[in-house]
Amino acid sequence: MKFGETFKEYLHGDQEWFLDKFSHVEYKRLKKVLKSCRRCRALHEGSSNIDQTDGGQNPALSQFCQCQSCPVCDQMFFSELMREATDIAGCFSSRVRHLLHLHFPTGMQRCMLRLRQCFKNDQQVLVEEGKMLIEYITMNAIAIRKILKKYDKIHSSANGKNFKSKMRAEHLELLQSPWLIELGALSLNFEGSDGESAFIQFSGSFSCDLDAEEPVMTLLLPHSIKLEYNLKCAICLEIVFNPYALSCGHLFCKSCACSAASVMIFQGLKASSPDSKCPICREAGVYANAVHMLELDLLIKRRNKDYWKERLVAERAETVKQSKEFWESQTKYVVGY
């Protein structure tokens, strides 16, 4: 079955009520843009023959597709696709963030959720919506990949490939979202928490190996997509502890990221300078919107308790040391010696 039919069935399947609230790739509309471009290209090929006979005296025909790219199609196609990818990434991150708040409630929300648990199974809600979100991001990522491949085939160009690179540079690569890692960690954290088959089904596609030389989380998604996320901090070369994902997508321990950003642990990454760069990709301004990976931290805590406790003690000691040095320096500045 062609992907277009598969995607259509997905949009109008059991989750249609869910998808009504979310943006998605307008696959059929984008294919229509490519079909119209093929007609332009046919006219262009016809105009080439005419130009050879009339000496290129027909300027109107030169406005059609120039084989490698079509300015009209480029503007319609890529601007529409970029808008859709941005909306999908925003919907996915906001919904996952809301979902994780149900698992890690704070303050008044915790009291409300405990009261609600007397009447409703929130864990079941987490499982069902988690599965729908994973399928949502996977299907849209595949749709984007398919339509870009189609674009390059029709235009005999690499514009679609270049657009994928642009999406990566703007952090719109859907399957590399830190929120997808958090969903994977959430599913693995359900293992052993309850014997219900729904939990097993949710976590069955995910695995995590923290004992390997390169600690990794593996996500086996629909349509035979296999993703691997390295869980080693590039600074301390250990399994990430109290992990943060910078907006460029790279994972670091909080203490290591603070060190790289030249801020103290108790100040946090939001105190970093806008000029601070990622130690790996050297992109600036990636600390302010860093994502605290709470589910991943809980997963590491459960899978490797001794290591987690050791790192916790070390981070607390370093935080106390930095705090003491900071306030001593502030006192000397105020007193004047």
Image (cartoon, grey):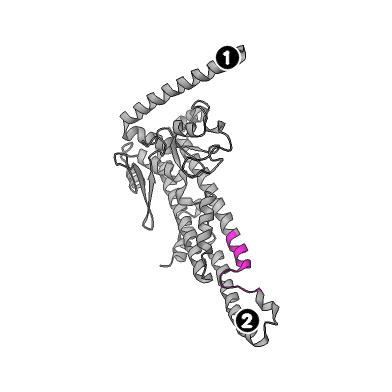
Tell me the quadrant of the picture where the N terminus can be found.
Answer: bottom left
Query: How would you rate the neighbour count of disc 1 (Cα within 10 Å): few for under 14, some for 14-19, many for 20 or more?
Result: few
Amino acid type of disc 2?
Ser
Contact flag, marks 1 and 2 (Cβ < 8 Å): no
Q: Earlier in the sequence, mark 1 or mark 2?
A: 2
Query: Which residues fall within the magenta stretch?
Result: 63-78
Residue 280 in view of the camera: yes
Residue at the image position 37 percent from the left and 28 percent from the top: 311
Question: Is residue 307 within the magenta segment?
Answer: no
261 in relation to 6, above or below: above
- Labels in figure, total: 2
Residue 81 appears left or right of 245:
right
Amino acid type of disc 1?
Lys
Instruction: Return the residue nearer the eye: 263 or 131.
Output: 263
Which residue in the structure is indicated by mark 2? 47
Q: Secondary structure at mark 2?
A: helix
Tell me the quadrant of the picture where the C terminus can be found.
Answer: top right
Q: Position of residue 93 (x, y in %)?
A: 51, 44
Which residue in the structure is indicated by mark 1? 332
Q: Position of residue 99 (x, y in %)?
A: 47, 40
Residue occupying the far left of the picture: 211
Residue 74 appears left or right of 231:
right
Instruction: Return the residue nearer the eye: 117 or 197.
Output: 197
Residue 304 appears left or right of 154:
left
What is the CA distance from the residue labelled 1 to the residue labelled 2? 81 Å
Q: Position of residue 250 (x, y in %)?
A: 46, 42
Q: Position of residue 222 (x, y in %)?
A: 38, 55
Residue at the image position 67 percent from the left and 86 percent from the top: 54
Residue 48 appears left or right of 291:
right
Query: How would you rate the neighbour count of disc 2 (Cα within 10 Å): few for under 14, some for 14-19, many for 20 or more?
Result: some
46 in relation to 103, above or below: below
Residue at the image position 35 percent from the left and 30 percent from the top: 308
